[in-house]
């Protein structure tokens, strides 16, 4: 099976990746991950600032030292009920240093057409979301946000976002360590095991 050699900017080590054994699931091997942690002086993930759902700028550097799940969301998608599992996961692990950052996007099937205010109201009323929501961005095509340009082009898991609720896992050092298919539910065994494993690392 071919390997990918993504090139990351800003002192991030080039990592040799093998594709994961599960459909829609990739993961860095232990050796590559360890090398990345030792060689990286700063994570590109922490260099981005985005507006939260209320329009206030938030630097992702404030999440340094936490395990983060990044997910592009939509309100009118067949995957939208994943909000329930995301909130359950957040409530379970937040006190151990886990964060979920949701980025509404209207790239797929026009399934996030509302304003930020409408999106916030929907998430709070329908799913009682407590994790951070960000202002609507684009995760694909020419107007792709720089964070997603990094994730899809320069992270260890290159490739376009395929649909709403694709997920990336970031470890406490800011390394992107896993990517999950949009149909992979947040409480799937492989996701929970990864979250617990990376939370256990200091």
Image (spheres, rainbow, N blue to C red):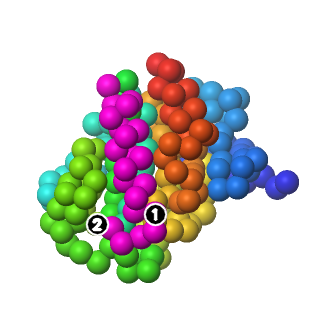
Along the line of sight, the residue nearer the viewer: 152 or 93: 93
- For this view, does 147 lie left or right of residue 52? right
Residue 30: x and y, percent?
Answer: 68, 29
Q: Which stretch appears magenta?
A: 75-95
Establish if 142 lies above or below 189: below
Give neighbour class at mark 1: few <14, some 14-19, many 20+ (Cα, 10 Å): some
Residue topped by disc 1: 79
The stretch drawn in magenta includes residue 80 = yes
Q: How many marks?
A: 2
Give neighbour class at mark 2: few <14, some 14-19, many 20+ (Cα, 10 Å): many
Residue 22: x and y, percent?
Answer: 72, 49
* Residue at disc 1, secondary structure: loop
Q: Residue at x 52, y 51 (%)?
A: 185
- Give the residue at the far bottom of this rendering: 110
- Which badge, 2 or 1, comes first in the chain's sequence? 1
Q: Residue at x 36, y 67 (%)?
A: 74
Residue 61: x and y, percent?
Answer: 31, 39
Residue 15: x and y, percent?
Answer: 67, 42
Which label belongs to residue 120? none
Residue topped by disc 2: 136
Q: Main secondary structure of the magenta part?
A: helix
The stretch drawn in magenta includes residue 89 = yes
Q: Quadrant of residue 54?
A: bottom left
**Residue 170 visible to the viewer:** yes
Quadrant containing the N terminus is: bottom right
**Residue 148 visible to the viewer:** no
Mark 2 vs mark 1: in front: 1
Measure how far apart labels 2 and 1 are at the Cα level.
Answer: 17 Å
* Residue at disc 2, secondary structure: loop
């Amino acid at each position: 099976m071919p390997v990918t050699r993504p090139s990351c900017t800003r002192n991030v080590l080039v990592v040799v990746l093998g594709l994961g054994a599960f459909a829609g699931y990739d993961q860095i091997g232990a050796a590559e991950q360890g090398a990345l942690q030792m060689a990286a002086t700063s994570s590109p993930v922490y260099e981005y600032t985005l507006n939260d759902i209320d329009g206030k700028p938030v630097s992702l550097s404030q999440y340094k030292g936490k395990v983060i799940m990044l997910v592009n969301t939509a309100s009118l998608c067949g995957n939208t009920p994943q909000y329930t599992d995301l909130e359950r996961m957040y409530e379970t692990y937040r006190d151990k240093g886990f964060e979920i950052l949701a980025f509404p996007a209207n790239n797929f099937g026009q399934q996030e057409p509302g304003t930020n205010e409408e999106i916030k109201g929907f998430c709070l009323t329908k799913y009682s979301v407590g994790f951070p929501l960000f202002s609507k961005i684009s995760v694909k095509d020419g107007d792709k946000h720089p964070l997603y340009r990094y994730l899809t082009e320069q992270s260890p898991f290159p490739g376009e976002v395929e649909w709403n609720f694709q997920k990336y896992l970031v470890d406490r050092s800011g390394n992107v360590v896993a990517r999950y298919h949009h149909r992979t539910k947040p409480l799937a065994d492989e996701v929970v095991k990864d979250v617990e494993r990376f939370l256990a690392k200091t």
